[in-house]
Image (cartoon, grey):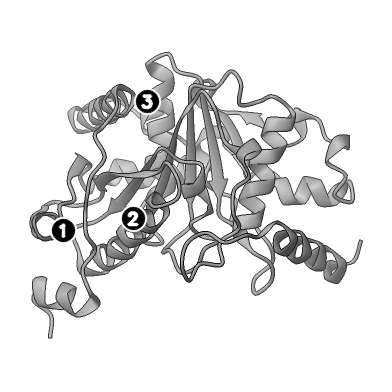
């Protein structure tokens, strides 16, 4: 199959599957058969480079340490979401589908699902080449493949680790499956600006789907004053806070989760915070009713001219 044929197949299938999803939306509509049943599903968003994959992977391990069966789905073409769990870059769902000329029935679970640290099952959805196709279709195909192989039936927790800012319906595709949308942000303007767009996206999807806003996970931040100001203005709430520790940065370089790093009081405190966050998410966090700000309002709120 040529690259052009492959891209046409992805775009054509997405177009055939598309239906309306709210006023002004071109998002691919989720069919009832694609719903993930029986598991708690979380979609983790945030500005690019803010630590979503680190947060997702350590949260997955925390859930596993609570005795839960966890599946983490990376939704970035870089396919490095599960890097610290598996210690390697895994093939993506799109890669393995292409290897069998998109005949999904020829695939086995071990072709695209790999077990990582703590027994966490890992999948990398991947994405179309830059400038072509739609990432939302890739997410849908990944969930479909997992359901066809009955890999979601004995899963307690599913975590979608989603790339960057929400700029189109494709980026929001995991929200169609999620119970709660979680936002990772630092205590700075750029993170909060991206978070505001994600708050708007989750609110839009909540009109037609079961997803609700869970809250913000403050990452790599010594303080929280800016985020607290934003929370007060919008109704958002903070779920957890992780400091700017060098050990967190080094964990990725060592291909390790924080639960595998050497013991220290600071690191043990971070591990305990992840376990607390996992326990609270499993118990069920109340949905947050937050209203996004206009761009100019964010500049005014945070003191920029």
Q: Judge whether 90 appears above or below 171 on screen.
A: above
Q: Decide which of 206, 189 is in the foreground and name it.
A: 206
Location of residue 189 in the rendering, given as x and y in whole percent from the top left corner: 21, 69
Mark 3 against mark 1, which lies toward the viewer?
Answer: 1
Q: Earlier in the sequence, mark 3 or mark 1?
A: 3
Tell me the tag on residue 203. 2
Q: What residue is pinned by disc 3?
A: 62
When asked about the image quadrant of residue 238, the answer is: top left
Measure the alpha-carbon separation of dots 2 and 1.
12 Å
Quarter of the picture holding the C terminus: bottom left
Q: Is residue 151 left or right of residue 219?
A: right
Q: Is residue 140 left or right of residue 148?
A: left
Q: Decide which of 178, 255 is in the foreground and name it.
A: 178
At a point 52% along the width and 33% down the height, the residue shown is: 85
Location of residue 168 in the rendering, given as x and y in whole percent from the top left corner: 50, 68
When asked about the image quadrant of residue 273, the answer is: top left
Residue 255 in view in this figure: no
Q: Judge whether 89 appears above or below 57 on screen.
A: below
Q: Is residue 194 left or right of residue 106?
A: left
Q: Is residue 182 left or right of residue 150?
A: left
Q: What residue is pinned by disc 1?
A: 234
Q: Residues within 10 Å of mark 3 (few under 14, many from 20)?
A: many
Mark 2 against mark 1, which lies toward the viewer?
Answer: 2
At a point 56% along the width and 50% down the height, the residue shown is: 75
Q: Are marks 3 and 1 in contact (CB under 8 Å)?
A: no
Q: Circle 1 — which element?
A: helix
Q: Earlier in the sequence, mark 2 or mark 1?
A: 2
Mark 3 against mark 2, which lies toward the viewer?
Answer: 2
Measure the alpha-carbon separation of dots 3 and 1.
29 Å
Measure the alpha-carbon separation of dots 3 and 2.
28 Å
């Amino acid at each position: 199959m040529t690259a052009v044929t492959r891209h046409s197949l992805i775009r054509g299938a997405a177009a055939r599957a598309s239906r309306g999803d709210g006023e002004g939306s071109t998002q691919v509509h989720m069919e009832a058969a694609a719903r993930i049943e029986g598991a708690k599903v979380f979609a983790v968003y945030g500005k690019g480079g803010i630590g979503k994959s680190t947060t997702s992977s350590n949260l997955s391990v925390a859930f596993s340490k609570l005795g839960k069966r966890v599946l983490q789905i990376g939704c970035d073409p870089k396919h490095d979401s599960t890097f610290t769990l598996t210690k390697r870059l895994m093939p993506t769902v799109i890669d393995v589908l292409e290897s069998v000329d998109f005949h999904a029935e020829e695939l086995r679970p071990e072709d695209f699902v790999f077990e990582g640290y703590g027994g966490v099952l890992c999948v990398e959805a991947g994405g179309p080449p830059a400038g072509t196709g739609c990432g939302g279709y890739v997410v849908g195909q990944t969930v479909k493949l997992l359901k066809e192989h009955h890999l979601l039936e004995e899963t307690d927790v599913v975590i979608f680790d989603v790339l960057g800012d929400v700029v189109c319906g494709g980026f929001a595709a995991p929200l169609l499956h999620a119970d709660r949308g979680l936002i990772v942000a630092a205590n700075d303007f750029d993170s909060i600006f991206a978070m505001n767009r994600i708050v708007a996206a989750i609110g839009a999807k909540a009109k037609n789907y079961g997803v609700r806003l869970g809250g913000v996970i403050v990452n790599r931040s010594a303080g929280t004053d800016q985020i607290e100001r934003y929370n007060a203005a919008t109704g958002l709430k903070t779920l957890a806070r992780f400091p700017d520790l060098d050990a967190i940065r080094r964990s990725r370089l060592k291909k390790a989760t924080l639960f595998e790093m050497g013991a220290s009081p600071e690191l043990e405190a971070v591990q305990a915070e992840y376990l607390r966050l996992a326990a609270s998410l499993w118990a069920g966090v109340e949905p947050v009713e937050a209203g996004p700000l206009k761009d100019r309002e964010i500049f005014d709120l945070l003191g920029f001219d």
